[in-house]
Every structure is written in C-alpha cells, then in structure tokens.
Image (cartoon, rainbow, N blue to C red):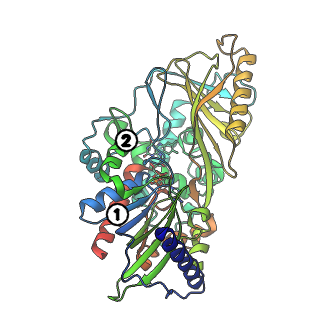
Amino acid sequence: MRLSLLISLALGLIVSTVRAAADNDTRGPFNPDGWFGRTTDVCIIGGGASGTYAAVRLKDMGKTVTVIEAKSTLGGHTETWTDPASGQTVELGVETWHVTNASMRFVDRFGIEVEYGLAPNTRDMLFVDYQTGRNMVGGVGYSLNDILAAQANYAVQRAKYVNLSSGYYLDSPVPEDFTLSFLDFAKKYQLEAILYFFYLQQQGGSDFLRQPALYVLKEFDLDRVVRSANNVTMRAKGQMHQIYDLALQELGDDVLLDSHAVGFLQNRRSNNKPSILVHVENSSSHELIMAEALLITAPLTIDNLRGLYPDPQETSLLGKFVPHYYYTGLVNSTGLPTNAEYNFAATGTEFHIPEVPGLYWLRSTNITGVFDFKYGHNTTDISRQAIQDDISAKVHAMHTSGDFNTTGDYNPQIIAFASHSPFGMQVSADDIKDGFYQQLYAEQGQRNTYFTGAAVAGHDSGELWDFTEAVVSKIAAAL
Ligand SMILES: Cc1cc2nc3c(=O)[nH]c(=O)nc-3n(C[C@H](O)[C@H](O)[C@H](O)COP(=O)(O)OP(=O)(O)OC[C@H]3O[C@@H](n4cnc5c(N)ncnc54)[C@H](O)[C@@H]3O)c2cc1C
C-alpha cells in the first residue's frame, strides 16, 4: 500500500515534470536526493541485439545496468522456433552474424561455438510469377555475365563509401548519389541485372526501387556483395537465440521483461550530477528507476518515444523516421515439392520485382513439409490473417498453374508467425540531404541520453555491435 502510494505520487511528479520539460523547463519539482527506488548507472530501453550487447559490455566495464524490454525474452529479431513434435528448430529471424571485432568478442564472451559461412543449401532455386503462380523457367531475365558485370559496377560505387559500414557517418554536403532513388542510382551505374537479387536479399519489404540509394548502399556492403561468405559470416552451431538466453541468465534481475518505459524525467542532483528518472510499466505493476544515463536501443518510432522524449525539437527530428513492416513464419500443408525455394517474382514489372505488400519466398526447411516465408510491406501493418490468405492464394495459383509437381491435397496453414515490425526505419531523400543523420548523431550524449540500434546504425548485428561498443565506451567514460 505504502509502495503504491509512493509510486502514484512519483508518477504525478513525472507527469507534471514532463509537461514542464515540454515547455523547455528541465528543472522539475522532483528532488532525486534521498531517493530510495532502484538506482542504476545506465537504463537501457530495448533488449534486442544492441540492448543486450550494451548491457553485458557495460557490466563488464563495472557499471550497473537496467534493461527495459517489451517482450518476454531478450534478443529482438533473433527468434528460434522449436517444433513441438520433433524438437527440431528453425530460425525465424537473424540467421548469421557478420564477423566484426565486437561480434567475435560477444560470441567468445558466452562461449558460443560458431560455424563460418552460410548454412549449406541444396534446395532447387525456382522463380514463381507472383500473380499467375507460373514457374518462370527463364529465371529473371539476365545472364550470369550480365549479373557479374553489374555486381562489379556496384562494387566500384560501394568502395567509395567504406565508412557506411560503421553507421550513418555522412559527409556534408551529403553525396548526391545517396539521395537518388535506388532505381535512378542503378540506371546511372548499370546495375539493372542485380536489382532482382538485391530485392530478394534486402530486408523488410520496402518499396525497394524507390527508397533513397543510401539505404541500399548501407545494407549491401562489399563483404555482402563481393567477399566469400566463409570469411565474413558466422552462425551459432546450435541455436542463434542461445546467446541471448545466456545473457539473460547472467543479467538476471537487471532485466525487466514484458515492460515499457512510459515516462521519464531529467533532473540534477545537489552534487550537480544529472540523473534520469524512468517510469516503467508492465501489465501488473509500475517501477521507478533512477539512472545516470539513458541508452535507447528500441526502434525510434513516435509510439516508442512518446512520453520518453519530452524535447519537442528531438521529437520532430526523430518523428521523421518512417517504418516498414516485416513478417516471417512457417507454413505447412502446401502440397508443393520439397527441397525447393520458391522465390516470387513478376513477369510483367520492371526488373521482375513484384509489388508490395508481398511474399518474398517460400523455402523448404529442415522440417519435412514445412516452408519458411518472408513477407513485407512499406506503408502499413498487416494482420496474420491477411498474410495467411495471401499465401493460400499464391499456393493455390501454383497448384492450378500445373507448372509444379504438386500433390492434390493442400491447405496451407501458418504454424509459426513473427512480426518484425516496425522495421527498417528510413527518412526521405530530402531529410538525408538536409543533414538528418548529422543532426541525429549530434544528439548522441546530450542530456546523458544515448542511442544505438538498427535505426541509428543499420540492420546488421555485427556492425551494430561495433557501433554499440563505441557508444558504451563513451557512456562509461562519461559516468
Ligand atoms: C527476419 C529478420 C532476419 C534478420 N537476419 C539477420 C541476419 O541474419 N544477420 C544480421 O546481422 N541481421 C539480421 N537482421 C537484422 C536485425 O534487425 C539486426 O541484426 C539486429 O537484430 C537489430 O538489433 P536492434 O537492437 O536494433 O533491434 P532488435 O533486436 O529488434 O531490438 C529492439 C528491442 O527493443 C524492444 N522494444 C521495442 N519497443 C520497446 C519499448 N517501447 N520498450 C522496451 N522495449 C522495446 C523490442 O522488443 C526488441 O527486443 C534480421 C532482421 C529480421 C527482422
């Protein structure tokens, strides 16, 4: 009773102070001296790849941490699914780690045994027209020589921007090529023959050809495009999620699962040290945390930042991000021949790229008769049922096309589903040109608030961990 009274009083203070802060008055009425709630050096919002890495590294540096994670587990986009019948597993999210200094350190830290390169793949590679369900036997229209030439052209352009692998450290003025649509960039440098393959491998279902070229250049670095996967990629011998299970065991009570930060307040202690009070909520209780620094790793959506970021200037900067929507899962009872990957393409569109929202592929997994799928949209969230209906319609079209050795009975059902939305936060070409990323990076460390995560540094765990390493070193030095 006493505790809940204390909390409601403190929450009242947060609300009034957030209002005060919104009026640019950061001196709220709350006096943190004499505080007796949970205190921590760093409060980390989001316990995915970057939040977990940050928590472990900061602890190793002797700092105390509290991680606020919305889901009931750490790991974010890393989701290992276990078949209840056979105990076999399938990775629904992150499948490989880029080999970087930080990724090597992190896997060693938890004694994860790794294998180098991509998982062996003996599946037949087929292309299916997304509207008619017909087998595109001619492939997607380019010869191997065309593809190799376009790949070489791309490598020449990408080599100009090696810094992009470390984050969005952009020069001023921003190179004009970054703000071209990727279609215009591709036409300028004769990349047409690789467009479909980039589309297939890119993550997140954006309107691929129309996004600013910056994002494609960021995602497809030289390691990904020209180097052998055996040198630049690794994966866990067991399950990819294991590293997060081990991290959770070690972090223990430093992690608050199923929790959201719903308000925060900045103040100064009498020793003039800044402190941040974070109001955390889960389904049954509230908690207040006093931190010396805040590290935001969750996607920088307005919803995630509401109540968390009282500064209107920052909210309008971060409010420029537009998310995409990305889903993965498993489907059974397709009646399709197994040991195959059905990559959806288009007979009638430019470069054979289908329209979004759309199904990228159905690929057979190690579990007989079970296919994994990836599905994306660039503007709105899509329900599981809508995706189920679309997959059923596409499988039906493949059966009726008569182009595949299908069996008579089929009734595709999604048996595992993961929404990875919001995903792939991007800003417009004009915002990139106007210095969005320079302004965002200038915010790093202001009022003891720091950022990392895919929106800030890109969707590559290895590169993200390198970026996060630099951020946590900065935080540790500042505390
Ligand atoms: C299907 C898929 C496959 C991928 N495959 C690979 C791959 O093979 N290799 C690779 O390197 N990268 C891959 N990626 C990219 C991947 O996104 C990044 O590697 C990395 O996991 C991103 O880390 P992050 O910390 O930014 O985000 P996340 O790992 O998503 O972490 C963000 C966390 O914040 C939590 N959160 C969100 N909002 C709140 C809130 N308000 N309060 C508290 N917590 C919140 C989320 O629940 C989540 O756990 C893949 C992504 C997807 C979706």
Q: Amino acid at mark 2?
A: Arg
Q: Is residue 321 visible?
A: no
In the drawing, does residue 54 fall left or right of residue 154? left
Percent position of residue 100, x then y: 31, 50
Residue named by callout 2:
227
Percent position of residue 380, x then y: 70, 51
User: In the image, what residue occupies the spot 74% across and 34% down?
Assistant: 348
Asked if disc 1 and disc 2 are in contact, CB closer than 8 Å, the reply is no
| Secondary structure found at label 2 | loop
User: In the image, what residue occupies the spot 56% across and 51% down?
Assistant: 189
**How far apart are labels 1 and 2 at the CA level?**
38 Å
Res 141 → quadrant: top right
Res 131 → quadrant: top right
Residue in the foreground of this view, choosing between 73 and 320: 73
Residue named by callout 1:
65
Counting residues from the start of the chain, the first of labels 1 and 2 encountered is 1
